[in-house]
Image: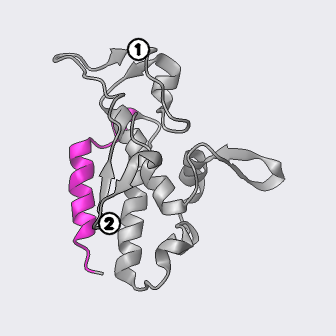
Amino acid sequence: MGINIQNIFLDEQGVPKLSTFGLSLTIPEGETHVETDAVVAYPGYAPPEYKATRKLTEKADVYSFGMLLLELLTGEHSYDKIRLRNDRYVCLVVYMHNHAQGHCINEIVDLAMLVGEEGTSLEWQLQGVLDLALRCTDEDPERRPTMVDVTKELRRIERIVP
C-alpha cells in the first residue's frame, strides 16, 4: 500500500517513475495473506478488507493502484470527501463506484487532461482506464484483477490509436 500520487516523480524526459516501496511486504510461499498491524497506509489507499481484518493479500496493492488511477483521472484526492445532495459526503472510491456508470467520461475526468485533446480514441482510452480503476477498487478482492492483468490491460488501452 505504498503506492500513492505523492510517490510519482517525472524524470528529465517527463516519464513517470514510482518510488517509496518501503511498505512492501512479501507473502510467504504457500500462504494467501499476511496479518499485520505494522502497515501504515496512506489515507484512502487501504483496501476495505485490510481495514476490517488487518490481513494483506496480493490484491491490496491492486486496490492502491486503482485509487491512484482514480486520483489521476478525476484530479480528486482519495481521502477527500465529496459533497452529494442533502449535505451527504462520501469518499472518492464510493462516489466513483456509485456515479461513474452511465456518465460520459468527459463528466468524470479532470478537464485539464482534455485541454487541446479531442477525439473518440482518447475518450476510449480514458474510459478504459476508468473501467480498470473501478475493477481494481472493487470491494471484493476476489473480483480485482492481478497486477499482471492490470499491466496487460494498460498496454491494451495504450494501443488504442489516438
Q: What element carries label 2?
A: loop
In percent of the image, x 79 and y 55: which residue is there? 85
Comparing labels 1 and 2, the label whose residue is closer to the camera: 2
As drawn, 149 above or below 143: below
Span shown in magenta: 141-161
Q: Is mark 1 on a helix, strand or loop?
A: loop
Residue 74 locus on image (x, y percent): 54, 61
Mark identifier at residue 14: 2
Residue 64 locus on image (x, y percent): 42, 40
Residue 136 is inside the magenta segment:
no
Marks 2 and 1: in contact by CB < 8 Å? no
Residue 88 locus on image (x, y percent): 77, 46
Residue 115 locus on image (x, y percent): 50, 81
Instruction: Please state, as top left, top right, bottom left or bottom right, where the C terminus lies in the image.
Output: bottom left
Instruction: Inspect the image, locate mark 2, and give the three-letter code of the amino acid beneath it.
Output: Gly
**Badge 1 or badge 2: first in the primary sequence:** 2
In percent of the image, x 32 and y 66: which residue is there? 14
Instruction: Inspect the image, locate mark 1, and give the three-letter code of the amino acid beneath it.
Output: Thr
The residue that disc 1 covers is 36
